[in-house]
Amino acid sequence: MKNPKAGWIFLLIFLVAFAIMGVLFPAADLGVGDTNIVPGDVAWMLTATALVLLMTPGLAFFYGGMVQPKNIISTILQSFIAMGIISVLWVLVGFSLAFGDSIGPEKYGLIGNPFTYFMFRGVGGATNPSLSPTIPFALFAMFQLKFAIITPALITGSFAGRVRFRAYMLFMTLFCIFIYAPLAHWTWHPNGFLRNWGVLDFAGGTVVHMSAGFAALAGAIFLGKRKDFHKEIKPANIPFILLGAGMLWFGWFGFNAGSSLSANSTAALALMNTNTASAAAMLTWIFYDAVKGKKPSGIGAAVGLVVGLVAITPAAGFVSVGSSIAIGVIAAFVSNYAITLRSKSQLDDTLDVFPAHGMGGITGMILTAVFADKVGLIHGEVTTFLFHMLALVIVGVFAFGGSYLMYKITDMIVPLRVSAQAEKVGLDISQHEESYDFEYKHSGDE
């Protein structure tokens, strides 16, 4: 797109049209008098939804602290803008694609009908028997939205410092529609085929972290290496990293415990497992680094605890607290080693999204099938484990191949990579005319 203003004008017109549609569509039923609503569940899910949203600003600080000072604002903004774009897209068609009436054979649904809840038609204060039996359907939709928001934000760490902002926004939209929504439908919709195979994903190890990890891998390959790839670059702000990790840990209690969709014992189990796995992974990371001759570091602690959170996500409501310790320890070893291998390769996954989130998600998915209560491998059951292995292959191929295609389509419309000059001066200036140190000159790159 040679004229950047034309693209912005189109987006502004679309948003105005969206606002007009919102006025024209009738309001959903407010659910007054619905006797199925459980006030305690509603209170907990309102809290959990807010906690999950907090994770995206947490991720913004976590990533922002890791990059060079010239890219801090752009990196943080890439997470923040997801809260805007995905929120609007979710109301328009995203929620329908993920949780609308299945298109496909019964119990083998592939995607939701985009018109089922178009513009949130029918998404109101009443319960939904199959998806939100004790809470307003609108609350369920908002809770699920927060998962859809953070997933593309996770991807941004793989191409930090070299992606055009307009192109990223387009890619994020395509990713949500064609990658995230189908995966959510397969895994969490009552007619989704992975769910009906018995694949266990309590809170998004497959839907969120594996999809983001494989999309990040595809993005790193598609965009290629940074110009200063071989230079040793120190993180801009380690306190930002620790602040972001702390916000992620705090918000993750809503992410995992909220996925019970009720204020019950499963929520308590998920919360306990989430905290324990994260603590175990953080300690393992620090101790393992020390064994390798490194000093205990803030970055190591932050990355380790996040890896533990990622790995326990699919298992949180299905395993014992003892198993959560094992999951955290194993995931820390796996991701730490994966980062070591990546650092010795020519792959420029800037913030190691695939080793942390991709490998953490894969490890968690496998170990869920190993430790899950009654159906895990340690209980002598093989079926769940085999279906998890099959699902791992399907999700990996779909997320990687589909995301690579989305990058290619995006690049044909808006070039994904910034110019060499824009990369040199930094994306804060070249893309946003802002700077962390408040001293900048316009580079002329759009």
Image: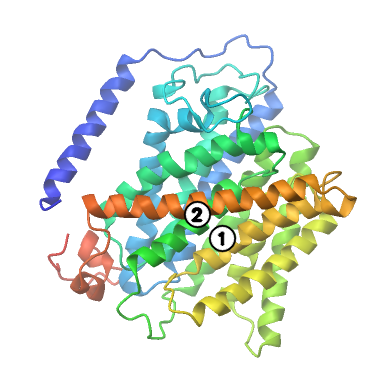
Residue at x-position 73% and y-position 33%: 263
Q: Could you give the CA–CA distance between mark 1 and mark 2, rounded to whole angstroms?
A: 7 Å
- Quadrant showing the C terminus: bottom left
**CA neighbours of label 2 inside 10 A, class few (<14), some (14 to 19), many (20+):** many
Compared to residue 349, the image places residue 107 above or below, namely above
* Residue under numbered circle 2: 212
Q: Depth check: give the residue in front, 423 or 376.
A: 376
Q: Which three-letter amino acid code belongs to the residue tagged 2?
A: Ala
Q: Please say which color scheme the image uses.
A: rainbow
Compared to residue 163, the image places residue 32 above or below, namely above
* Residue under numbered circle 1: 357
Left or right, 124 with respect to 324, comes to: left
Residue at x-position 66% and y-position 70%: 334
Residue 217 rendering spot, x and y as whole percentages: 46, 63
Left or right, 376 with respect to 141, comes to: right
Q: Is residue 271 visible?
A: no
Residue at x-position 71% and y-position 46%: 387
**CA neighbours of label 1 inside 10 A, class few (<14), some (14 to 19), many (20+):** many
